[in-house]
Amino acid sequence: MLPWSFGRDLSGFDETVDDIETYDGPNAAHYYELCATCKECKRELLIRREHLQKRKDDARMTEQAKEKEVEQKTYEALENFILKGGTPNLGRLDSQFDIFCVDYFYRFYDPNPHGYMTRHIKFQDFDCQKGNEDEAHLEGRFWLNANVTCDLIPFKPPRQTSLKHFKTKTIDAKHTLVVQFLDDNHLTLRTSRDLVWMDKPQEETIPETFVFEGVRNDFGKHLQTWSKLFAQTRGILPQASG
């Protein structure tokens, strides 16, 4: 059994491990041997449950911290607009933004290490428009989990940071994503519960709209650059003779 499969199974488990009924029958030695084994297994399961709970608590704290980080950028963007009467230009947006939402976390957290991969929206240059800055378009992919992922219709991004709601649609035109590009490294994304839940039955208490706070993550972009440089370097190095 895998560690992350214990959570719900132990929900009613008594946390005491030393309660053993006395038995002095003919198989007493075997009985107490089994009791000792059960105690050790129970203790191990409880330790693993505590580990899983700590991992969930740490993930929740990260979720909350990232939300606050982007909320602060929202306030700064509003302050800049009020005090300076304008907004800075946006740089290139062809990167990945990891997205965070406590409402989503509480409903979809999965302790399986492969079940809670980083949610993100990823933008990249639209091939047909490369080389023309005035008409530069981006295409994107929205990824929540293995069951909720979709491509976006290519769009022309805003040139300046803004609190205005910028709308784009999924490639099948069924869902709308509303984005605020706060600066080069932060965004706020809103989408309906119909997209978040996709084809699953919806809970009555879920919000109509989920608000995700996005933080830029250039690791994948840098990794591609490093890989290209490495390949080019290998291409110009003299080959070792056999």
Image (cartoon, helix red, strand yellow):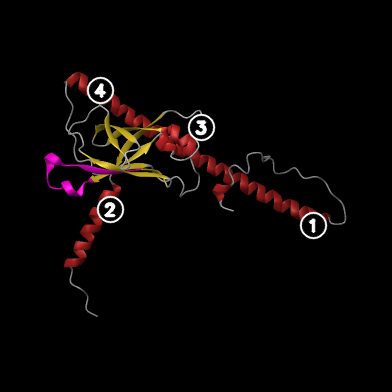
Labels 4 and 3: the sequence-earlier one: 4
Residue 67, picture quadrant: top left
Q: Quadrant of residue 216?
A: top left
Find the distance from the CA under tag 2 to the CA under tag 4.
Answer: 34 Å
Q: Amino acid at mark 2?
A: Leu
Viewer-closest of 55 and 142 = 142
**Residue 26: which quarter of the image?**
bottom right
Q: Which mark, residue 30?
A: 1
- Name the kind of residue labelled 4 in the image: Leu
Q: Which residues are magenta?
A: 125-142
User: Looking at the image, is mark 1 or mark 4 nearer the viewer?
Assistant: 4
Q: Nearer the observer, disc 3 or disc 2?
A: 3
Q: Which numbered disc, 1 or 4, marks the residue that appears first in the sequence?
A: 1
In x, y percent, where is residue 10?
Answer: 63, 42
Q: Position of residue 71 (x, y in %)?
A: 33, 28
- Please say whether residue 9 is one of the residues in the magenta stretch: no
Indicate which disc residue 78 carries. 4
Question: Which of 79/154 is in front?
Answer: 154
Give the tally of numbered discs: 4
- Dot 1 amino acid type: His
Left or right: where 68 falls relative to 238: right
Q: Is residue 11 left or right of residue 203?
A: right
Gap in angstroms between the C-alphas marked 1 and 2: 58 Å
Q: Earlier in the sequence, mark 1 or mark 2?
A: 1
| Residue type for callout 3 | Glu
**Label of residue 223 in the image:** 2
Residue at position x 49%, y 34% in the image: 202
- Residue 188 in the image, given as x and y percentages of width and height: 32, 32
> How many residues crowd mark 3 within 10 Å: few (<14), some (14–19), many (20+)?
few
For disc 3, the marked residue is 203
Between marks 1 and 4, how big is the CA–CA gap? 72 Å
Instruction: Judge the density around disc 2: few (<14), some (14-19), many (≥20) Cα neighbours within 10 Å.
Output: few
